[in-house]
Amino acid sequence: MGNEKFQKDLTEGSVSRQLLRFSLPFLAAVALQAFYNVADMLIVGWFEGSVGISAVGIGGQITLLVVNLITGLAVGGTVLIAQYAGAKQYQDEKETVGTLFTIYGLAAVLLTVVLLFVVEPMLRMMSTPAESFAQARDYLNICVAGTIFIFGYNAVSAVLRGMGDSKNPLLFVAIATVTNIVLDVLLVGPLHMGAAGAAVATVAAQALSLVLSIVYLSRRDFLFDFRPKSFRIYRDKAKLLLKIGLPSSVQNTLVSLSFVTLMTLVNGFGLDASAAFNIGGKVNSFAILPGIAMSQAIASMAGQNIGAGRPERALDTMKAGLRINILIALAICGAILVWPGPIMSMFNAGEATILAGTDFLRCLAGDAVISSIVFCFNGLFLGGGHTLVTLANAFMTSIFLRVPLAFLLANGVGLGLAGVGLAMTLAPLGGIVFGLIFLRTGRWKKRRIDVAADAMLEG
């Protein structure tokens, strides 16, 4: 049987009202998540200046790359759980949850051991400015040591999203955000721990949130009891998770690699450019998060409807999300264009950093609008489990367009950091074209659990 306390049927009722009601906790959660991510850099900037900003930005980008190596499985879990929920296949849903948690735990341990040996070589490879190298190393070592908590939090949230529960993930991220900010101020300020203090705050906040979420769910008869004997890999579910999740992991990794490449390019311009790029990147990550949240909401709602054999309702979900997303993105884009200087000044960076970052933000502002459209397409395609499609889209946008355009505009044309921002805005236009083409084929309507089952039968 499904767990009615957490299960929510998204296949009935008004599409717009259902999506808006379901997505609001997502939007609130990503707003908190954005503030959570910005807090480290903002607080470090006030106490450590451009050196701390550069260290946290570089260390944070590598941490994101590592997390993205495995988070695709969370996407696969969300999709499968949503489709099993829509099809009322509750035993399959339970086995998928157990398999997802087990794989995540094993991956976290393995990656932690490996990464602790390659931190310094990675920082050198990225041309990390000498002034910020030591702080970036300390930040990254601490974050790597806390990988298990970051992975665990993401796994729990992915499962709840697939079940149609967007409120409890909001509660858990709220706890993490408040804890992170309080510890940031204490460790970076009075205790003068610099970037290392920000890393300790991040890991501690994720650990507390994970522990509290497990206690909360366990006491409410959640379908997974978190006992050692329940951590088990079901081969058929693992295959489905890998088939759906691996392309998404590769997709996320490609996107992260493209930004690591851009960061390496910008680091060559010096400390001020590095700090400006990292501040601008944080502002942009805040700007696009509503789009990411809507994409996740669309994926969960579309997944249930495709699982229930109602693809047209899934398409209506995407269209409703697109309307909401564009309005939000236009407002954010306008705010960045009007106040780029004051936004940069919030981080207490030097004058040279603020000047470079202001031009960078102006060139980057349009990315919020263009990417919000791509996110809505991806939400629909992910709902059906078509992660190979979103992978191909990401490859074209990140590797084929964003990186070459950045080098061309920054070095070839001579626009420098502003050219990197312009490339980041223009590249997602290719994703819109790609999404429209796949949408017209109608292939997104076939649910992935049926495609996988057909493939197994043919094999």
Image: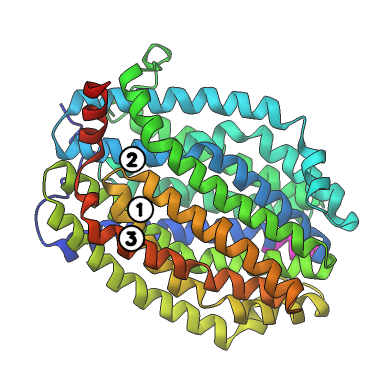
Query: Is residue 113 positioned above or below 11 on the image?
Result: above
Give how far across and how far down residue 43 sits, in percent.
Answer: 70, 61
Q: Residue 283 occupies which quadrant of the picture?
A: bottom right
In three-dimensional space, the C-alpha distance between marks 1 and 2, rounded to whole angstroms, equals 9 Å
Front residue of 192 and 289: 289
- The residue at the point 53 percent across, 65 percent down is 286
Query: Is residue 44 positioned above or below 367 on the image?
Result: above
Query: Is residue 247 positioned above or below 255 on the image?
Result: above
Image mark for residue 377? 3
Residue type highlighted by circle 2: Thr
In three-dimensional space, the C-alpha distance between marks 3 and 1, rounded to whole angstroms, equals 11 Å
Residue type highlighted by circle 3: Phe
Image mark for residue 48? none
Are circles 1 and 2 on residues that touch, CB within 8 Å?
yes
Q: Does residue 60 show up?
A: yes
Image mark for residue 296? 1
Question: In this view, which residue lies farthest toward the front?
Answer: 458
Residue type highlighted by circle 1: Gln
Magenta residues (range): 42-49
Judge whether residue 394 is colored magenta: no
Which mark's residue is nearer the viewer, 3 or 1? 3
**N-terminal label among 1 and 2:** 2
In three-dimensional space, the C-alpha distance between marks 3 and 2, rounded to whole angstroms, equals 17 Å
Give how far across and how far down residue 444 sits, in percent.
Answer: 24, 50
Front residue of 324 and 1: 324
Give how far across and how far down residue 197 sits, in percent.
Answer: 74, 47
- The residue at the point 67 percent across, 83 percent down is 341
- The residue at the point 78 percent across, 70 percent down is 273
Residue hosting label 2: 78
